[in-house]
């Protein structure tokens, strides 16, 4: 067997062992006939709140994924709809951040005056937890939807900005000289030499940003409520539906991974070797 | 000084100083360098590391600005980079995210913006072929090429944009001796088929003799000067294997080596920055003209250097016969 198959096989074995152990140590849910009177009075709530076995989660996942876009009112929407809301917020805030971070990053990277002027602001604003902006955003913008998008904007702007500036500033001077000796104008130099030269660093920044944005959206949606995968988790917790909670945690992980994979493939497309 | 029609480049009293970081006297890399390059001429410049060769080349390219003095090409003062002056750096001349062909096309597109894509491609490919690349090698990225192949691509690009002056900064410095030899042959072949003017920095005395019509010798820095201009009186076509048997070869070679080991330092030591009687033009020497006298310039170096300071108008010295 070649080593390309070894790691995936071991991963699969590990997963089976973990899920198997989990399944074995989860006590079976008693059926209603076996409940004591007291338990019946409590509506079986204490049983429901128990951590469910993997098999129950698989069943739940199958149900949800086979009908992802149903909509039975504000508190009961399909997982697909919730994910779509979250992605919409993440991508909107993220694209707005990119529209500002990339040009400003270029400017900072090319001009040390711009760098020195803006650096103190960046240094102070960057370490602020994005959620700390939430109250201020809610007060000023007066709209929970837009506030969530703003929080995504503010958290994804810094890695993109800093990496773009760093990438642009560190483009090898010889390559810029190649552009100069070929009489390329500023714009063509920026697009045909500096951009491709800095692209790997810029994309790394964008990849870090999308990761942070996806982390933050869950927390932001728990705060603002209404829709989205973060709200869904919180809502199912309030319903004490732990099967759904665990299922949605898995979905958050998988979507985050797909976003990251996407940027990884962009990254390998612009990567070059000196 | 004759500044005839066939002069392409005139360098007049070129001085480059770098401000010192702690506010002391500035560092003068070279001072009052004056020389010219004729159309179609192949000129090499040799000098010790740090004497300011790259600085001169960058000023000629327009990438750096001299503190004082002027560079005049075809009657126009150089002030900024131009496609008329192609540059090949020691490393990193190629853009690593583009294939070899794309790198050449990058230059050709900038040079001939009106050409169709096919014209650009064909012209670029032709020049890659001229330096022995093709059959798939042109599609590889620089990182997938050997050091020698990379420099070939750089040279192909420089020739493809047909600059009036080609500036080469130690193009073969990073290559092993064998590869260097084959690329030197390549360069000679491409150059002889053109009327390209070349100014090239090298550390390698044999390389300079093989390639150059004339070799400029720089004294040590700081306050370096272009002290001598050595004519290479060896007929072309020259072949690497045959040239060492030419009677003038070792006379010229000894002259160059003697300059680098002894006189480049002496000139630097004798230099008095306050005197204005200093010769700013290199004296022209032709050690290859009298090759019978093998004693050439062995034991009278100091007196020779003293002679330099009184010669003011580019005399032609014949070392072997003395004066
Ligand atoms: N940006 C700079 N600031 C200050 N000094 C500099 C700068 N660039 C070069 N120098 C100095 O100028 C001198 C000449 O440098 P240059 O690179 O031209 O030498 P070189 O003759 O090309 O040497 P080598 O053969 O090693 O390439 C050196 O002493 C160097 O320290
Ligand atoms: Mg140099």
Image (cartoon, rainbow, N blue to C red):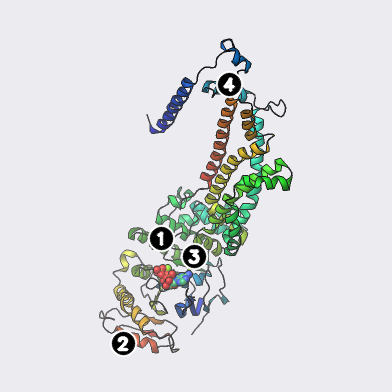
- Counting residues from the N terminus, which is met first, the one under dot 3 or under dot 1? 3
> With respect to residue A8, does B249 lie above or below?
below
Is the residue at mark 2 in contact range of ligand 1, meaning its CB lies under 8 Å from it? no
Callout 1 secondary element: helix
Which chain hosts label 1? Answer: B
Residue B268 against residue B195 in the figure, above or below: below
Q: Which residue is mark 1?
A: B186
Instruction: Give the quadrant of residue A64.
Output: top right
Same chain, labels 4 and 1: no
Q: The residue marked by circle 4 belongs to what chain?
A: A
Question: Which residue has dot 4 on it?
Answer: A46
The residues tagged by marks 4 and 3 sit, at their Cα atoms, a distance apart of 79 Å
User: Where on the image, by quarter, is ligand 2?
Assistant: bottom left
Question: Which residue carries the number 2 mark?
Answer: B303
Circle number at residue B87? 3
**Mark 3 → mark 1, Cα distance in angstroms:** 17 Å
């Amino acid at each position: 067997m070649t080593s390309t198959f070894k790691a995936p096989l071991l991963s699969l074995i590990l997963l089976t062992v973990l899920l198997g152990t989990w399944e074995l140590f989860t006590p079976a849910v008693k059926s209603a006939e076996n409940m004591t009177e007291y338990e019946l009075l409590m509506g079986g709530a204490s049983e429901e709140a128990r951590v469910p076995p993997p098999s129950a989660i698989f069943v739940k996942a199958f149900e949800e994924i086979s009908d992802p876009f149903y909509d039975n009112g504000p508190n009961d929407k399909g997982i697909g709809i919730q994910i779509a809301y979250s992605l919409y917020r993440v991508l909107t805030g993220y694209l707005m951040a990119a529209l500002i971070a990339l040009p400003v990053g270029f400017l900072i990277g090319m001009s040390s005056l711009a760098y020195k002027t803006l650096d103190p602001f960046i240094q102070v604003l960057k370490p602020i937890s994005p959620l700390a902006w939430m109250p201020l955003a809610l007060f000023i913008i007066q709209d929970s939807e837009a506030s969530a998008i703003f929080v995504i904007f503010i958290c994804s702007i810094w890695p993109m900005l800093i990496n773009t500036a760093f990438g642009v500033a560190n483009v090898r001077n010889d390559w810029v000289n190649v552009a100069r000796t070929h009489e390329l104008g500023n714009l063509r130099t920026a697009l045909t030499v500096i951009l491709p030269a800095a692209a790997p660093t810029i994309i790394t920044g964008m990849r870090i940003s999308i990761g942070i944005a996806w982390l933050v959206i869950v927390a932001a949606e728990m705060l603002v409520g209404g829709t989205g995968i973060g709200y869904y988790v919180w809502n199912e917790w309030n319903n004490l539906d732990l099967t759904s909670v665990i299922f949605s945690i898995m979905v958050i992980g998988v979507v985050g991974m797909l976003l990251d994979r996407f940027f990884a493939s962009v990254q390998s497309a612009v990567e070059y070797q000196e | 000084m004759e500044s005839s029609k066939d002069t392409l480049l005139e360098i007049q009293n070129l001085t480059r100083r770098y401000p010192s970081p702690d506010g002391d006297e500035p560092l003068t890399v070279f001072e009052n360098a004056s020389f010219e390059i004729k159309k179609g001429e192949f000129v090499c410049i040799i000098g010790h590391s740090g004497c300011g060769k790259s600085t001169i080349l960058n000023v000629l390219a327009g990438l750096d600005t001299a503190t004082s003095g002027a560079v005049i090409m075809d009657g126009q003062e150089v002030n900024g980079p131009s496609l008329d002056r192609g540059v090949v750096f020691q490393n990193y001349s190629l853009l690593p995210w583009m294939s070899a062909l794309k790198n050449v096309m990058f230059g050709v597109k900038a040079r001939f913006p009106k050409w169709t894509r096919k014209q650009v491609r064909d012209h670029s490919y032709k020049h890659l072929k001229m330096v022995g690349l093709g059959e798939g090698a042109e599609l590889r990225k620089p990182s997938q090429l050997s050091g020698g192949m990379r420099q070939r691509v750089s040279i192909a690009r420089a020739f493809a944009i047909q600059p009036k002056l080609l500036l080469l900064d130690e193009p073969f410095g990073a290559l092993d001796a064998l590869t260097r030899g084959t690329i030197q042959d390549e360069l000679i072949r491409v150059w002889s088929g053109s009327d390209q003017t070349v100014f090239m920095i090298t550390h390698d005395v044999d390389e300079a003799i093989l390639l150059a019509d004339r070799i400029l010798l720089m004294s040590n820095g700081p306050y370096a000067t272009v002290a001598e201009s050595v004519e290479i009186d060896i007929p072309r076509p020259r072949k690497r294997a045959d040239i060492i048997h030419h009677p003038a070869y070792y006379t010229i070679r000894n002259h160059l080596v003697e300059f680098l080991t002894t006189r480049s330092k002496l000139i630097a030591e004798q230099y008095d920055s306050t005197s204005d009687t200093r010769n700013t033009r290199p004296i022209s020497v032709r050690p290859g003209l009298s090759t019978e006298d093998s004693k050439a310039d062995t034991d009278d170096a100091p007196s020779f250097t003293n002679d330099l300071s009184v010669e003011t108008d580019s005399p032609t010295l014949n070392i072997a016969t003395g004066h």
